[in-house]
Amino acid sequence: MPFLALLVFVIMVAALVDAITRRDDQVLHLPKFAWIIFIILLPLVGSVLWFALGREWGRASEPMSFGDPRRWSREAEQPAAASPMRDTRTTEQQLADLEREERAARLEAEIRRRRSAQEDGAN
């Protein structure tokens, strides 16, 4: 008998956690608050009905932390855009490219400085 009580308690806690962490637009048939009260007052029946009727069973989504703003967003989830191409260069290659860019920028600045000095000298 204690096993049955423990099982009902575990199911009730799981249903409560699931109901509380769901966004309002993912709760069906009753407001979220009503489902929570129903689960607390009738633990076994409320929990079973919550899992059977009260929650939206959509596709599996990526896990989110409790504080993730997307969890509380009411906007429809947009399909993930294609991920940008990954940079497959090593760190050394990236640093070498950065040094080349810095050198090119210094050379361009030097060219602008010399042209400006040449134009000032010609006038």
Image (cartoon, rainbow, N blue to C red):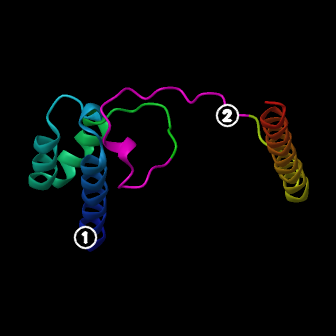
Query: Which span is picked out in magenta?
Result: 63-84
Q: Which residue is mark 1?
A: 1
Q: Which residue is located at x 42 percent, y 55 percent? A: 65
Query: Do labels 2 and 1 touch, CB within 8 Å?
Result: no
Magenta stretch: dominant secondary structure: loop
Q: Nearer the viewer, residue 51 or 26?
A: 26
Front-lying residue, 88 or 102? 102
Q: Earlier in the sequence, mark 2 or mark 1?
A: 1
Three-letter amino acid code at the position of disc 1? Met
Q: Quadrant of the N terminus?
A: bottom left
Q: How many dots with numbers?
A: 2
Q: Foreground: 85 or 103? A: 103
Q: Quadrant of residue 70?
A: top left
Residue 24 belongs to the span the image colors magenta = no
Q: Is residue 60 left or right of residue 38?
A: right
* Quadrant occupied by the C terminus: top right
Q: Which residue is mark 2?
A: 83
Residue 60 position within the rendered picture, expressed as x and y whole percent measured from the top left: 50, 37
Please name the residue shown 18% across and 46% down the image: 46
- In the displayed structure, would residue 16 be above or below residue 53? below
The secondary structure type at the circle numbered 2 is loop
